[in-house]
Image (spheres, helix red, strand yellow):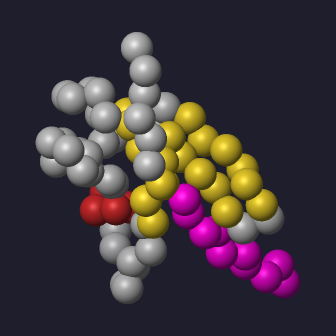
């Protein structure tokens, strides 16, 4: 079974509660619950691989991680 993946940005204009920022499939609009895999790209970026359970479409999201100062 071959997979098709495309990168999608997850930047938002305002922070939402954790449950609201789950991605939806761009093909069938089903909500994703858990990523299949994740990869640490750089000091401030993580990539997630998603595959839709309903239609099988795969895509990748990238997230920027904010660093917090330790006092």
Is 63 one of the magenta-colored residues? yes
Is 65 one of the magenta-colored residues? yes
Q: Main secondary structure of the magenta part?
A: loop
Q: Where 13 sits versus 22, above or below?
A: below
Quadrant assignment, res 52: top left
**What number of labels is visible?**
0
Relative to residue 3, is residue 63 drawn left or right?
right
List x then y, in percent, for residue 65: 64, 68
Quadrant assignment, res 58: top left
Quadrant assignment, res 9: bottom left
Task: Inspect this view and state whether residue 1 appears.
Answer: yes
Query: Which residue ends up furthest to the right in the rendered image?
Result: 71
What residue is rendered at 79% in x and 82% in y?
69
Q: Where 32 sits versus 18, above or below?
A: above
Q: Quadrant of the C terminus?
A: bottom right
What residue is rendered at 73% in x and 54% in y?
41
List x then y, in percent, for residue 13: 37, 85
Q: Quadrant of the N terminus?
A: top left
For the residue pair 41 and 7, the one nearer the viewer reads as: 7
List x then y, in percent, for residue 24: 26, 51
Relative to residue 65, is residue 67 drawn left or right?
right
List x then y, in percent, for residue 7: 48, 54
Part of the protein shown in magenta: 62-71
């Amino acid at each position: 079974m071959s997979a098709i993946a495309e990168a999608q940005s997850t930047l938002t204009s305002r922070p939402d509660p954790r449950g609201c920022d789950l991605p939806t499939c761009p093909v069938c609009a089903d909500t994703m619950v858990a990523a299949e895999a994740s990869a640490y790209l750089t000091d401030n970026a993580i990539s997630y691989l998603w595959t839709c359970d309903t239609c099988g479409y795969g895509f990748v999201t990238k997230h920027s991680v904010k660093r917090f100062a330790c006092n």
